[in-house]
Amino acid sequence: MVVIVLDNGAGTAKVGYSTDKQPRVIPNCVTKAKNVRTRIFIGDQIDECKDLSGLYYLLPFQKGYLVNWEVEKQVWDHMFGKDMLQVDFNEASIIMTEPYFNFRSIQEAMNEILFEEYQFKSVLRTNASYLSQYKKNQDNSQNPLCTLVLDSGYSFSHIVPYLKGKKLAEAIKRVHVGGKLLTNHLKEVISYRQLMVMDETYVINQLKEDVCYVSTQFMKDMEIARKKGSENTVMRDYVLPDYTHITRGYVRPIEETTGKAQGNEQIIRMNNERFAIPELLFHPSDVGIHEMGIAEALMLSVESTSKEMQPHLLGNILLTGGNCYLPGFEERFYMAVRSMAPTEFDISMTLPKNPVTYAWEGGVQLANDKDFEKMLVTREQFEEYGHNICLEKFDV
Amino acid sequence: MADKRESGRVKELQQRRILDEPARRRRQRKALEALEQDNFQDDPHADLKMSKKAPKFEESIEIGNIGQISSAKKKKKNRTEYFKYRLKKSFAALIEEEQLLSTDPPNYFSASTPPSKFPERHFCAVCGFPSSYICVSCGSRYCSVKCLGTHQDTRCLKWTA
Ligand SMILES: Nc1ncnc2c1ncn2[C@@H]1O[C@H](COP(=O)(O)OP(=O)(O)O)[C@@H](O)[C@H]1O
Ligand SMILES: [Zn+2]
Ligand SMILES: [Zn+2]
């Protein structure tokens, strides 16, 4: 059986055959470059672009939901086509993820595209956290009763509780802070304080991933960041790429951190920005978003489940999504949850080695499950029963 | 020279202006919308002639469907029409539709989180350090005389919406 696993994130699509060791992680967008006017770049084709300044993005997702199908279709055609997976659709099944509470019309469009346009043999639509908790359970011999998944990606962050592999939809919580917002806020702050970089999403996103971290001692780090000279251990100089001599931005070694540019290079001084930006995950109100942070939302989610379930959920928290890569994330999240949770409950967290591809890896394992075929809807079934059979079988 | 004197006078006038509450909220909303934006520059290829290679998704669906799906032709055509129409929905339209459906929770709306129970923290709009003062004109936060000066020279009433 040929199975393709596609964790279709709003930021990156994780895609590959269930026989692959690792997925390809490709930007889920079409990009136009300021200095390359002869072509566009679809998904990972952006790697062929030598000058990544002033990129213009066409994104299929808006606020976490698929709205621009024309762009998405281009990316999928590229992934499934001759340049990448060379899919034989008649023989292939697909596991595809989508956001929580996906809108009905998007679900239907998804069915139509997969069954009618691409003509996949069979389809399983699900959520990324389903695949993540599935993997966690498979890899754990004790098979815990509950899993509480944090899924913190590009558009937003969700807390999703599972009981025996079944999602507790009524306890799902969403915080509108994701990696996109962090990058945009960092662009804003740097543009105001230092250098106009509003057009430089690609570069500033890299800067974020290179130097930002989650503080475990916020006020203390603020004090350190006020200090001058070598006492300020927070400060870093980030050398921007110029795409002639410097092809990628980089952090200067601490010993060489002076806050001054050398020669012709351009630098950005990263001080309290390093930890104040990711802080939005924990305090959205820092920028006026009137929502709880992710740790508080986790407690809200747990409290809306039954009393018996709560210790099981807190005892098995799984951290997934790109923002969990931020240094200090797990420690801070643990501290925050610990401080709010009833003291008699143990709290246990797992941060996978790769929180971005973890759901995809779960999809690969699911494709080998003895019950996998029963979860699929075949093209014949779709032709006969239409959307209804998908509504019945897929728990999205 | 004349310019300088002019701007000094304008600044003084501005300093006496005070942003009212609706204007402050508008400004805040704009700032939040900016955090969602995909691009801050114009399409760099906007002036290029539409490439022949540019995909026409709708067309390709019709072609893809012909003769490959067993359902009746008429039904198929209707579906394709419907499909095209549906593909154009914005996020706002989807939300509106979802509200009209008014399904019982759990749904998109039940998953939203209320404001935090913890007190809000405040940071200087200029330097990002904790702040304890509020600009009387616009309500922004600042931490020191120096930052207030920068704020007044740059943002304070400059981008009033
Ligand atoms: N090392 C890192 N440090 C900080 N953020 C990261 C890192 N790696 C990825 N991210 C962020 O994670 C987000 C993408 O996460 P992902 O789980 O792939 O989201 P989605 O599935 O919604 O596309 C991006 O905003 C990206 O900047
Ligand atoms: Zn200040
Ligand atoms: Zn002001």
Image: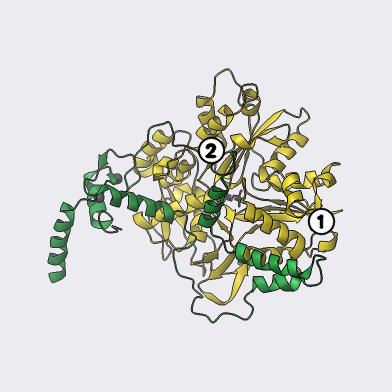
Q: Comparing marks 2 and 1, which lies closer to the viewer? A: 1
Chain where mark 1 sits: A
* Type of amino acid under label 2: Gly
Whole-percent x and y of residue B40?
44, 63
In the shown orientation, is residue A366 left or right of residue B140? right
Q: Which color is chain A depicted in?
A: yellow
Which residue is drawn at the image coordinates 60% and 26% (left, top)? A347
Which residue is drawn at the image coordinates 63% and 37% (left, top)? A169
The part of the image, by quadrant, that contains residue A194 is: bottom left
In the shown orientation, is residue A342 left or right of residue A134? left
Which residue is drawn at the image coordinates 78% and 72% (left, top)? B66
| Label 2 crowd bin: few (<14), some (14–19), many (20+), radius 10 Å | some
Whole-percent x and y of residue A289?
43, 44
Along the polypeptide, which appears first: circle 2 or circle 1? 2
Q: In this view of the protein, which residue sits in the foreground, B101 or A66?
A: B101
Q: In this view of the protein, which residue sits in the foreground, B62 or A267?
A: B62
Q: Is residue A349 above or below residue B141?
A: above
Disc 2 secondary structure class: loop
* Type of amino acid under label 1: Glu
The CA distance from mark 2 to mark 1 is 51 Å
Q: Is residue B126 visible?
A: no
In the shown orientation, is residue B93 left or right of residue A285? right
Whole-percent x and y of residue A125?
72, 50
Label number found at residue B128:
none
Residue named by callout 2? A328
Quadrant where the C terminus of chain A sits is top right
Say yes or no: labels 2 and 1 on the same chain: yes
Q: Is residue A18 visible?
A: yes
Residue named by callout 1? A384
Chain seen in green: B
Task: Report how many numbered discs are placed on residues in the image.
Answer: 2
